[in-house]
Amino acid sequence: MSPKSERGFGLFLLGLKANVTLRDKFGRQITDLRVSVTDRCNFRCVYCRSANPETHMPAGNLLEWDEYERLVRLLVGLGIRKVRVTGGEPLVRPGIENFVARLKMIGVQDLSMTTNGYMLANHCEGLVAAGMNRINISLDSLNREKFEQITRTKTFEQVIAGIDAAQSSKLRPVKVNAVLVRGINDDEVEAFAQFARDRDLIMRFIEFMPLDADRAWTRDMVVTGAEVYRRISAIWPLVPVTHERSETARKFRFADGRGEIGLISPVSQPFCGHCSRLRLTADGKLRTCLFSKEDHDLRSLLRGRASDGEISDRIQAIVSQKEKGHRINEPGFLPPSRTMVSIGG
Ligand code: SAM
């Protein structure tokens, strides 16, 4: 077969495989993958990491780029259409742009990243050139002092420069994420809404989840999406924006102008019934829920010379057992042993 017809045949096979779907026992179709490329982060956000030194995954446990590429290729063959690269902080891992380009070559239709924005201004062009479609940037305060307290860094300007760079680039949409914690930044809801209007971007408010390293989460620290909606719509009328059922955010635009808000309410209004997500951790574990009690080791299969078929079969078996929901609101709930930074948000 000539190289050209060989490539054509490869694409034909990929097309056939794209019809394969990953479904769990509740009938949910799994189309979205979060890929964590590191458990390291250059921020220490109070709702995520501890101020104390934490242990990191040994380097030898981290998946190599080739291993990620193989797994994502298999997952795309099983019906994954959206891939979000995350961490830790994904931009701290050298070679990230090249990895994004490799994901694009595999045929990932919708490729995005979640970043704290600190290194984004320098990486933005490279990510666009590599085929990145969209970006989510975390920003938990518009007040420099408070931002420094939350992130335990002095990087406010660089993060704003990262948002500027994203907005001037081809990345669309640009979403800015704030985790609201009662008593820390819940006084900024209206300011964040104004930020979305001024900059014509999507401002998303995320409920604080029990995934922090200090295990300080309590229910009264959660600022609900309903409260955010009430406070913003009391000033600026909001109009619902249609969204896919599996999307995490309920979206609204401002009736009188630019910008949008998204309410991500996993605690007060769980959306598990429409969940379409899987997570791959930096050490090669597949997780079917943020709050899974156990994760599933794919690294040993990769390194143990399992065939593509064996790995795909294992993935399908794991997905079929995806839990019904996260159980945060059930009596006796216990948070998972892994915290957000080592799962990949
Ligand atoms: N470093 C990147 C960043 O800061 O966006 C990506 C990784 S971070 C773990 C992914 C997302 O998880 C961020 O939006 C972060 O705010 C969110 N997050 C971390 N801990 C959380 C918690 N306990 N509850 C809710 N969201 C959390």
Image (cartoon, rainbow, N blue to C red):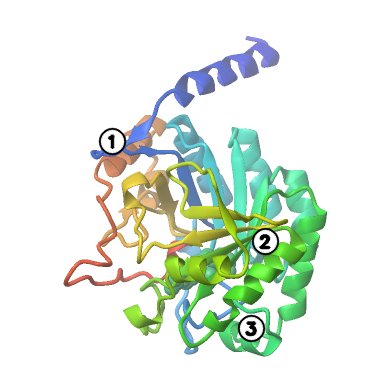
Name the residue nearer the viewer: 176 or 114.
176
Q: Identify the residue at image location x=44%, y=75%.
A: 223
Q: Identify the residue at image location x=49%, y=54%.
A: 250
Task: Give the number of the disc on residue 27.
Answer: 1
Task: Give the number of the disc on residue 147.
Answer: 3
Regarding residue 114, the answer to whether it shows in the image is yes
Residue at image mark 2? 94
Q: Earlier in the sequence, mark 2 or mark 1?
A: 1
- Secondary structure state at the residue bearing disc 2: loop
Quadrant location of residue 106? top right
| Residue 342 percent across, percent down from the top left | 44, 67
- For residue 255, side relative to residue 325 (left or right): right
The amino acid type found where label 1 is placed reads: Gly
Q: Identify the residue at image location x=27%, y=54%.
A: 325
- Secondary structure state at the residue bearing disc 3: helix
Which circle, 2 or 3, is nearer the viewer? 3
Name the residue nearer the viewer: 181 or 253.
253
| Residue 29 percent across, percent down from the top left | 37, 36
- For residue 4, side relative to residue 138 (left or right): right
* Label 2, residues with CA under 10 Å away: few <14, some 14-19, many ≥20: few
- Secondary structure state at the residue bearing disc 1: loop
Task: Give the number of the disc on residue 333.
Answer: none
Q: Earlier in the sequence, mark 2 or mark 3?
A: 2
